[in-house]
Image (cartoon, helix red, strand yellow):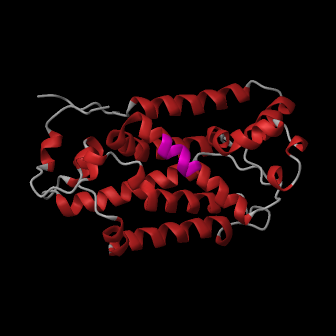
Amino acid sequence: MRREPVFNIPGVVLALLGLIVAIHGARLMLSEADDTFVVLAMAFIPDRYAAHPLDWPGGALSTWLSPVTHMLLHGDATHLALNGASLAAFGAIIARRVGVFRFSLFSAFCGVVGALTFLMFNWGVQAPLIGASGAIAGMMAVALRLLFSAIDASPDGLAGDLIRRAPQFVPIKTLRETLMDRRMQSATAIWLLINLLAAYGMATPAQVGVVAWEAHIGGYFVGLFLFGLFDRPMAHERDDEIDISAGLDGPNRL
């Protein structure tokens, strides 16, 4: 009998986690001035686009790269741990379903759209945006979409194992079916409420704006609506003949 490893995270997700942790560790060895320079050079700062990009560390190059590089930075160990755990949980599902290349494109795409959504609501603001939360929000939206699809399509009790071990076998619902699903509507409404409460309802005046809810919302909805562009064609084709429980018998693909 083949034993399941306690941690079975796809290599691409482990590599991304390792890169994020390594960057955070390297920053801890810098002086305060050097760390500030690195953060401002890699962070997504709306004022770069409202003023001259040369006013900020990184110059014109950071104007182009910071929509991606901001995802590699985190404010402190708690921020890093929360995003790392979420990335491991949701990222593993997406990576197993679509593979390394599509996972990388999808993650970057959600993160960039999250940053652009933040820009729309904060034009000219000088506060830097850092963290992978926008990308992770997009992964979470897809994970929920796959979970509810698996619950409806799989035998009793197999949905959780299928999502965790073989999400590539889940016959995903169409976008219209997903949007009409009451469970998806409820989960989305609760998630939006949590974000708004974290940003405003449970924050002191000095803390308002610390949670980049705009990036979370942008990443979530672009992941929910546009995942089909990144999904493997064979993975999302609907086939009434498919035995999705078969995916639990073989080894993981990633």
Q: Residue at x 17, y 41 (%)?
A: 248
Residue 82 appears at what percent x and percent y? 54, 46
Foreground of the two, 102 or 35: 102
Q: Can residue 233 be seen from the camera position used here?
A: yes
Specify whether 50 is left or right of 72. Answer: right
Q: Is residue 25 above or below residue 195?
A: above
Placement of the N terminus among the 4 image quadrants: top left
Side of 14 relative to 177 (left or right) = right
Residue located 83% across and 59% down the image: 124
Pick whichever, 34 or 54, lies toward us. 54
User: Is residue 96 left or right of 12 when viewed as pictured?
Assistant: left
Q: Quadrant of the C terminus?
A: top left
- Position in image of residue 7 (x %, y %): 35, 33
Against 107, is 253 above or below?
above
Q: Nearer the viewer, residue 101 or 71?
A: 101
Q: In the image, 244: left or right of 55? A: left
Q: Estimate the x, y position of residue 102 in percent, counting from the top left.
A: 42, 40
Look at 14% across and 59% down and name the residue there: 156
What's the magenta region?
A: 105-111
Residue 29 lies in the magenta-colored region: no
In the depicted structure, whether residue 35 falls above or below residue 243? above
